[in-house]
Image: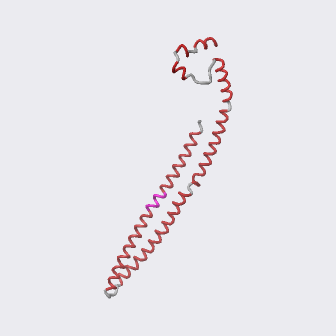
Amino acid sequence: LHYSTPRIVIFFVYFFQLKRVVVSRISTQLKTARVLQQNLNHYQSKVESIRQGVNVTLAKGKQVDQKTADRLKRNEDKYSIAKREYEDFASDLCTLIEEVTQRSWKDLHPMLIKMAQFDATLSNDEASSLSNLNQVVSVLKQLAQKHGLQPSARLKEIETLTAKMISTKQADEYIE
């Protein structure tokens, strides 16, 4: 059928575009999430290290110098910001992944409608084409009657009988 190929191609083009967009978006966002997580881990480790140093100083009964206190405060602030950024981004990424996995049928819905319309059109065209088949069957039956053909195939005869026994050449010449 001349019109089926373009419609199928359109479906597959759309399907692969959808796949490309989803994979590209998710991949990019996963890379960003990894960077944000590394940043979060960096500041978490840094804050823990500074706090450990502060605890050792305090355990010795000494006062923590202002430079170390400022450094701890600055890194705690950076850690807090990094944590908020990572959590917000990760939450959005999870929402996106959930959307494209659990509700992806919505993205395919327009194509499903087009395919159903295509199938309906194809079915109608086939029904129209096949409506003349009863006439073909009738002509074939007349031809079989004219030539003395049986409804069963001649495979067994061809396999076992001699050529002269299965030949219908004389009957064909007589009929013509």
Does residue 73 belong to the magenta stretch?
no
76 and 145: which is toward the camera: 145
Residue 127 location, quadrant: top right
Q: Is residue 80 left or right of residue 50?
A: right
From this view, report whether residue 60 is shown above or below residue 48: below
Residue 46 location, quadrant: bottom left
Chain part drawn in magenta? 25-31
From this view, report whether residue 120 is shown above or below residue 99: above
Describe the colour scheme in one phrase. Answer: secondary structure
Residue ID at (53%, 63%): 95
Total marks placed: 0
Q: Is residue 68 left or right of residue 164?
A: left
Residue ID at (41%, 70%): 40
Looking at the picture, how far across and down is residue 117, in whole percent?
A: 64, 44
35 and 95: which is toward the camera: 95
Does residue 28 belong to the magenta stretch?
yes
* Quarter of the figure with the C terminus: top right
Looking at the picture, how far across and down is residue 6, in whole percent?
A: 57, 41
The secondary structure that most of the magenta stretch takes on is helix
* Quarter of the figure with the N terminus: top right
Residue ID at (57%, 54%): 105
Looking at the picture, how far across and down is residue 170, in whole percent?
A: 59, 12
Q: Is residue 96 left or right of residue 134?
A: left
* Residue found farthest to the left: 60
Residue ID at (55%, 14%): 165
